[in-house]
Image (spheres, rainbow, N blue to C red):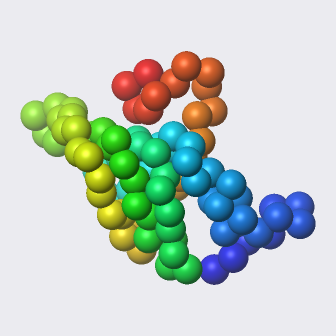
């Protein structure tokens, strides 16, 4: 599915974020922040210098990863840094 944002396709918006830090919210209880290395037609994303956040009944867990591949079917939302100085869910 491609959404038009005032003449700019959603895939083009994601393409503009390559090399930038992004915050990805998944459909499950996980969120990721990292630098977007690339994506494909299915919006599977490769991130590097990643922090994974998982919400569990015991609290919020955090893990550092060198690189990860996110399945586009499970991505709910991807954001660039909307708040100056923000680095993700803990900011």
Residue at 55% in and 80% down:
41
The reply to whether residue 32 is visible in this rendering is no
Residue at 40% in and 41% down:
33
To which quarter of the image does residue 68 belong? Answer: bottom left
Residue 45, placed above or below residue 41: above
Q: Where is residue 86 in the image (x, y as percent from the top left)?
A: 52, 24
In this rendering, position of residue 53 left or right of residue 17: left
To which quarter of the image does residue 12 belong? Answer: bottom right
Q: Position of residue 25 (x, y in %)?
A: 43, 50
In this rendering, position of residue 50 left or right of residue 36: left
In this rendering, position of residue 27 left or right of residue 87: left
To which quarter of the image does residue 64 belong? Answer: top left
The reply to whether residue 66 is visible in this rendering is yes
Q: Where is residue 88 in the image (x, y as percent from the top left)?
A: 44, 32
Quadrant location of the C terminus in the rendered image: top left
Residue at 46% in and 45% down:
35
């Amino acid at each position: 599915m491609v959404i038009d944002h005032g003449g700019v396709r959603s895939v083009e918006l994601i393409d503009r974020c390559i090399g930038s830090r992004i915050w990805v919210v998944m459909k499950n209880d996980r969120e990721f922040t990292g630098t977007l290395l690339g994506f494909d037609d299915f919006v599977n994303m490769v991130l590097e210098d990643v922090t994974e956040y998982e919400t569990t009944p015991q609290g919020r867990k955090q893990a550092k990863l060198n690189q990860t591949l996110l399945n586009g079917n499970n991505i709910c939302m991807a954001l660039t840094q909307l708040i100056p100085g923000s680095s993700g869910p803990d900011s």
